[in-house]
Image (tube, rainbow, N blue to C red):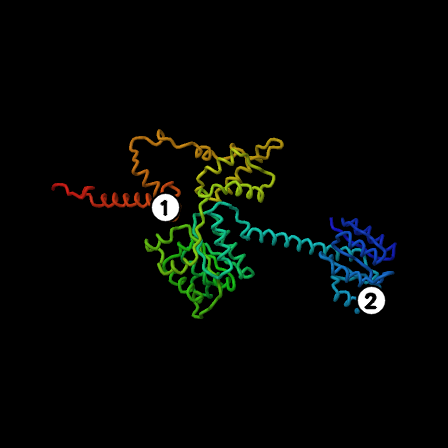
């Protein structure tokens, strides 16, 4: 309900206006003098003040001046019987948003107030959305108290204030885009644009045009000029996700752009310069991509300035309860989760990371809603997929032993999986396996020797060649 303060020393007119505004759905406080108006303004909050210019004690201009000093100032409409341009101009100069010259129609007053109320509602909505956006993009919005996440958040704090190039590494669904937005939000470029390009989502023929733009007629279908994302990001941040999927030919042009911040639109000979900060992300092992010759080595060194490794969700299971409660608070505030279900979520390996967790909770919320008994708004084990209960079953030797089982192959697969999950970091891989780094190196050397023996069957394991 919107509140309006009506200030007029004519009782009859005041009653008529108050009744009309109340019938329109507003709450109206009516006073007969300026001093009464100041007392009301001190004790209540109003959206609009409608005041006469001429009052028995202080003028409407003085009421207006007092209103403008309030922390959350209402809009002021000035009423006057003096049809002079000077009084209206003076009132508008001092902060009145509109004026009415007596006599005026009640419909005219209703229209003016409705317009102001609508504008205030839109401003409040924008303010709320901006506050939510600020919270979502802030570093504080990153949920996690595990040692790995504390390390990531500390790195973001350190690098955000600089213009250094950042490389975010981690599996799909770990939150690389969220971190990129947080870095931009806390940088000196926060008031500039943040342009995001998902390199793997675009075919190679369109990616160059999306990045650098093109001139009209540059290629078939280029019917008009297009500004690329690198140009749109001027004085802001350019975030290129899945940088490891950029095709080789475009890698050369991208390397030149990163080096000197200069580029040509497709089909143009004009050299353009922009001021951008780079953030890159990939779910691939880029060092391996260099060895596989799918990523240029010089490009890798250009983007690998300040790498941040985002841990997979299964590597920070201690954070899962807080993540679950945060997701439910934002999306389903009336729901909670039972401890048995939460325990299952913590034990699940989460191949899809946080994105998969969000989807599972969304599914559970639907099931709770459709089969909900009165007052039961709790996610239970029965609302989770069968795979979660199965994943909680312990792995026993009897379940592993079967014809064709190989303990050497199992060990090799476990080591390779640990290296993949840790993006090649042997210290982290050793932690996942529960062994020392020295022992991991020893096992890797043994696997390497076994592979060499397989590649050279003419040699036995003891180095003695069999008889021909």
Image height check: is 432 above or below 108?
Answer: above
Q: Is residue 24 rendered to the left or right of residue 153?
A: right
Label whose residue precedes the other's in the sequence (1 or 2): 2
SS class of the residue under badge 2?
loop
Circle 1 residues within 10 Å: few <14, some 14–19, many ≥20: some
Q: Position of residue 324 (x, y in %)?
A: 53, 41
Q: Position of residue 256 (x, y in %)?
A: 40, 65
Residue farthest along the bottom direction in this orientation:
270
* Residue drawn at the location 20% of the way across and 45% of the way down: 456
Q: Position of residue 397 (x, y in %)?
A: 35, 30
Q: Position of residue 435 (x, y in %)?
A: 36, 41
Q: Alpha-carbon distance for marks 1 and 2?
A: 83 Å
Q: Which residue is mark 1?
A: 419
Quadrant (top left, top right, bottom left, bottom right) of the C terminus: top left
Image height check: is 450 above or below 39?
Answer: above
Q: Which sits in the foreground, 161 or 14?
A: 161
Q: Which residue is mark 2?
A: 83
Residue farthest along the top direction in this orientation:
398
* Residue drawn at the location 39% of the way across and 32% of the way down: 395
Circle 2 residues within 10 Å: few <14, some 14–19, many ≥20: few
* Residue drawn at the location 76% of the way across and 59% of the way down: 67
**Res. 35 image quadrant:** bottom right
């Amino acid at each position: 309900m919107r509140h309006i303060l009506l200030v007029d020393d004519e009782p009859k007119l005041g009653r008529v206006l108050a009744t009309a505004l109340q019938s329109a759905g507003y709450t109206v406080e009516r006073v007969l003098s300026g001093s009464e108006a100041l007392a009301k303004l001190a004790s209540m909050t109003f959206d609009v003040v409608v005041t006469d210019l001429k009052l028995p004690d202080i003028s409407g201009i003085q009421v207006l001046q007092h209103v403008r000093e309030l922390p959350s100032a209402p809009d002021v409409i000035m009423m006057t019987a003096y049809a002079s341009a000077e009084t209206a101009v003076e009132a508008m100069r001092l902060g009145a948003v509109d004026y009415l010259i007596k006599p005026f129609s009640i419909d005219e007053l209703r229209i003016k107030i409705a317009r102001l109320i609508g504008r205030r509602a839109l401003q409040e909505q924008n303010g709320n959305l901006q506050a939510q956006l600020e919270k979502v993009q802030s570093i504080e919005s990153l949920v996690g108290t595990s040692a790995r996440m504390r390390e990531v958040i500390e790195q973001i704090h350190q690098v955000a204030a600089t213009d250094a190039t950042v490389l975010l590494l981690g599996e799909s669904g770990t939150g690389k885009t969220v971190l990129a937005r947080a870095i931009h939000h806390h940088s000196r470029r926060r008031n500039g644009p943040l342009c995001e390009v998902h390199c793997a989502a675009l075919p190679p023929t369109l990616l160059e045009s999306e990045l650098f733009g093109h001139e009209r007629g540059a290629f078939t279908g280029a019917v008009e000029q297009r500004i690329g994302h690198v140009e749109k990001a001027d004085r802001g941040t350019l975030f290129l996700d899945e940088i490891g999927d950029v095709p080789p030919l475009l890698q050369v042009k991208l390397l030149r752009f990163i080096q000197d911040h200069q580029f040509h639109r497709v089909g143009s000979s004009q050299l353009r310069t922009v001021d951008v900060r780079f953030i890159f992300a990939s779910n691939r092992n880029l060092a391996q991509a260099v060895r596989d010759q799918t990523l240029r080595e010089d490009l890798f060194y250009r983007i690998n300035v300040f790498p941040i490794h985002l841990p997979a969700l299964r590597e920070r299971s201690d954070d899962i309860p807080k993540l679950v409660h945060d997701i439910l608070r934002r999306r389903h505030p009336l729901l909670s989760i039972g401890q048995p279900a939460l325990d299952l979520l913590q034990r699940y390996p989460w191949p899809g990371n946080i994105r998969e967790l969000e989807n599972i909770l969304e599914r559970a919320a639907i099931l709770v809603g459709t089969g909900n008994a009165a007052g039961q708004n709790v996610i239970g084990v029965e609302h989770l997929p069968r795979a979660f209960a199965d994943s909680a079953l312990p792995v026993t030797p009897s379940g592993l032993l079967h014809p064709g089982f190989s303990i050497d192959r199992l060990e090799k697969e476990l080591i390779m999986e640990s290296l993949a999950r840790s993006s090649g970091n042997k210290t982290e891989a050793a932690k996942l396996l529960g062994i020392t780094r020295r022992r991991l190196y020893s096992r890797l050397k043994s696997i390497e020797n076994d592979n060499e023996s397989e590649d050279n069957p003419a040699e036995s394991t003891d180095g003695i060649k069999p008889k021909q």
